[in-house]
Image: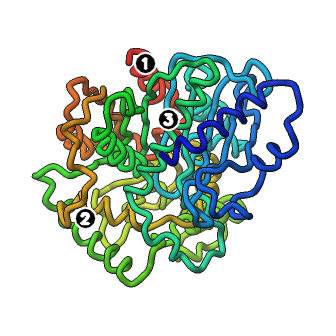
Amino acid sequence: MAAWLCVGALGFAQQARAGNDPWDRWDRERLEQPYGEGEADEICTLGNAERRQLADDIYEYSYRVRVGPGVYDVITLHRVVRELGPWSPVRTQKSMFLVHGDALGFRGAFLSSAASLEVPTSQSIAVFLARRGVDVWGIDLRWVHVPSGTKDFSFMKDWNLGTHAQDVGTGLTLARTVRALTGNGGDKMNLLGWSRGATISYAYLNGETQQPPHNRHVSGFIPVDMAYSLAPGATLERHAACLTHTVFAQAQTERKYEGGEIGLLLQVLGSSAINSPAESSVLLPGSTNRQAALFFGSATHVFQVPLPVIQGYHWAAGQFSEAGAPTGLAWTDERFFFDTLVQAAPYQSIGEQVDTFAMWCGAPDVPYDDHLARVKVPVLYVGASGGVGGYGLHSLSRLGSTDVSTHMVPGYGHADLFLASGAQNVVWAPILDWVQRH
């Protein structure tokens, strides 16, 4: 119900900016009011509507949406689409809603090239899809908005998979309504989730089955390189997941609601590699700053504590010397990778991580997989052999879908799927082809 409270406002904002007449001053001030200032008691209010050019006639719109009474109970909706004129997007038949994973928000995950001078702005999946007639929407989850320097994370106490899945539902409701109000029809949307975003998307679909068909928002599902549960034979992986769940759940019990400041780590790795690549790394003694960042990208599993669940897991496939030192990246431009690390959000809630490891472990029981057999939308699984890869296939068997396809990319790491120079042909084009047929 909360989503519908701001449907009219968001639709009005879209319609108003499509015209040439100036807004009424009160409406402009309301939409541009920073969140957390005077609106803590107003649920699902809007703030800071923005528009920026990405490439040619492709623009990004973003809207901050209040989804709760707390200062950081805020999500941002992004829309990447071709324009006819200022605030006047073209009408499209196809649409997609993207959910990011750990550390990186929507821009870092799906639009990172816009913040790098090393690659063309078009080298992001959001621009790629928009240029080919897809209306691309996406979300920044609540923790993306938490600023560096925050010390008290008690507001994250109850944030978990269910919280973020609910926010995805709010985003889908608003996106579909805006499309309907602007002449695109009210058709359901394809839902793409990458990494933890796929986990959140699974949780959303699990809950959506409890709604009548006319209240459901998803027409097709694209989980990218993530497992929702582990196959019965994955004994070693399950053991590592159970151990990790114990550690994370204990931290939560001790009122540590932030998940380890991984975003700050990535920011330091990226900025140090850019600004002083040859200096000795403080984070990884014995390496230079450049080597430390490359090592994180090409041997990410080494940084996972207490144990890596998936041996050999890495973000970007690397190149190594005979001594095993990283010398470069195989598929992704090195500087572009560093630029992406800098875009990480400082903090992330621990709740969704605890829930994910519980499902991988198989205990304790969580409610996010009770109705998976009733999920019957078409599914395309995209995996990277150096990421989660084949571990994500078992999750597909738990769905009730009969139209299930897979696209495995050999040699790629987890983030290569969105950052690699050849990802447009190897990954994004097959996704687009599937969307065009579904």
Residue 244 position, x and y percent, is 29, 70
Residue holding disc 2: 241
Determine whether 122 is above or below 263 in the image.
Answer: above
Query: SS of the residue at dot 3?
Result: strand
Comparing 253 with 237, the one in front is 253
Q: Is residue 262 visible?
A: yes
Relative side of 106 to 164, left or right: right
Relative side of 119 to 384, left or right: right
Q: Earlier in the sequence, mark 1 or mark 2?
A: 2
Q: Residue at x 59, y 48 (%)?
A: 108
Relative side of 108 to 302, left or right: right
Residue 342 position, x and y percent, is 64, 57
Residue 263 position, x and y percent, is 55, 64
Comparing 40 with 411, the one in front is 40
Please rate how many residues cluster around mark 3, counting C-alpha atoms within 10 Å: few if below 14, some from 14 to 19, many from 20.
Answer: many
Q: Quadrant of residue 235?
A: bottom left
Residue 380 position, x and y percent, is 33, 30
Return the mark for residue 97: 3
Residue holding disc 1: 433
Q: Residue at x 22, y 68 (%)?
A: 242
Q: Is residue 386 visible?
A: no
Query: SS of the residue at dot 2?
Result: helix
Image colouring: rainbow
Determine whether 254 is above or below 132 in the image.
Answer: below
* Amino acid at pointer 1: Asp
* Amino acid at pointer 2: Ala
Relative side of 270 to 402, left or right: right
Query: SS of the residue at dot 1?
Result: helix
Please rate how many residues cluster around mark 1, counting C-alpha atoms within 10 Å: few if below 14, some from 14 to 19, many from 20.
Answer: few
- The answer for how far apart the CA atoms under marks 1 and 2 are is 35 Å
